[in-house]
Image (cartoon, rainbow, N blue to C red):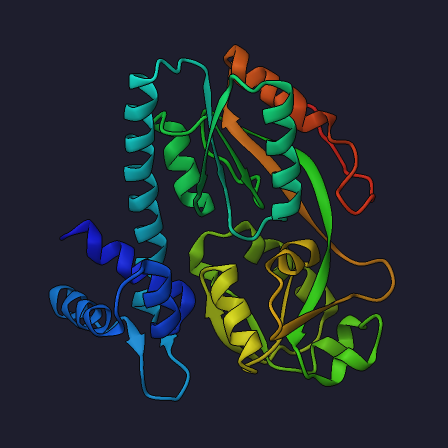
Amino acid sequence: MELRLLRYFAAVAEELHLARAAERLGIDQSPLSRAMRDLEKLLGVALFDRSSRQTRLTWAGQVLLVECRRVLATVDQAIKATKGAAQGYQNYVRIAICDSLAQPRIATLLARSREEEPELEIRVFELPFSQQLKGLHTDLLDVGFALSAAVNHGLVAELVWTDPLSVIVPARHPLLAHTQVKLADALKFPLVLCHPDAASGCHDQIKAVLDDAGLPLKVVDHVTSLGVMLTLVGAGYGIGFAIASQVQALNRPDIATRPLAGTPPILSTYLVRRGGEPSEPLARFIKRVKSMSKAPNGEPSTYLSEP
């Protein structure tokens, strides 16, 4: 299979709009549409549900998107490593982030790293938690940021910060009449949630919050990424839950956020790495992570030292 097809598919799957995907790739719509039909024919599965006006990924398409991102990230890493070796780079840290994390916080961390240690090359990959674990075990990654501490043998997970959970709604929605939303009121509406088979810490943490509410849930769809969830929410399929700063950074006019009333539930972010003594560049990077004692919005973060 050509990598070109995977890159094309990733763009269409993330945009869920052929014209926007074609513009993003710098090609015409016609060859892009033909490439998607060729890919479905090659795999023998339907990747897109075209039965309604809104293009949606099938479950097979959602699974392929996760795997596609992993393959493309590995290829991109190989290219960067080769170019870095040719330029004489020796100090680098390879980090992975899951797509449900608060990107402004990660951006602050990377900016601080460039300022304090400009000679350190940092390579960033967006990977789901399960692929982060594989990358750490096979030495393709040095550290990961994820919403789960369910690591397996040889890995260490450290709580590094927490973020309040917010409600994500379409731009025109009854819940926007409130400055804060009660969880019980939010659960009266259809929900778009992370898929339970996606091995996502985001799913586990949000599920625990919803289970504690003890109310029946109207789940209309499960997704494997934050991007797809926001697309479905923006299209009016239902509401979702996420970290507000992550969503607001995307500046999407079709969605809005509201904090949960009272003491809001939180999502915990973990730094995941191999056990044992880290390399000097990685040790400095981890120290920098732990020095970020306040979130971008000024709220205190919670830290857990390695035992």
Q: Is residue 254 left or right of residue 256?
A: left
Depth check: give the residue in front, 207 or 113: 113
Percent x, y of residue 74: 31, 38
When asked about the image quadrant of residue 27, the answer is: bottom left
Residue closest to the far bottom: 52
Q: Is residue 57 visible?
A: no
Q: Residue at x 30, y 45 (%)?
A: 72
Q: Residue at x 55, y 58 (%)?
A: 203
Percent x, y of residue 192: 55, 72
Q: Residue at x 51, y 75 (%)?
A: 232
In the depicted structure, whether residue 255 falls above or below residue 65:
below
Q: Is residue 131 visible?
A: yes
Percent x, y of residue 128: 45, 47
In the depicted structure, whether residue 137 falls above or below residue 206:
above
In the depicted structure, whether residue 109 falls above or below residue 184:
above
Quadrant location of the C terminus?
Answer: top right
Depth check: give the residue in front, 124 or 211: 124
When asked about the image quadrant of residue 272, the answer is: top right
Q: Residue at x 64, y 20 (%)?
A: 116
Percent x, y of residue 215: 70, 76
Q: Is residue 133 left or right of residue 219?
A: left
The count of marks equals 0
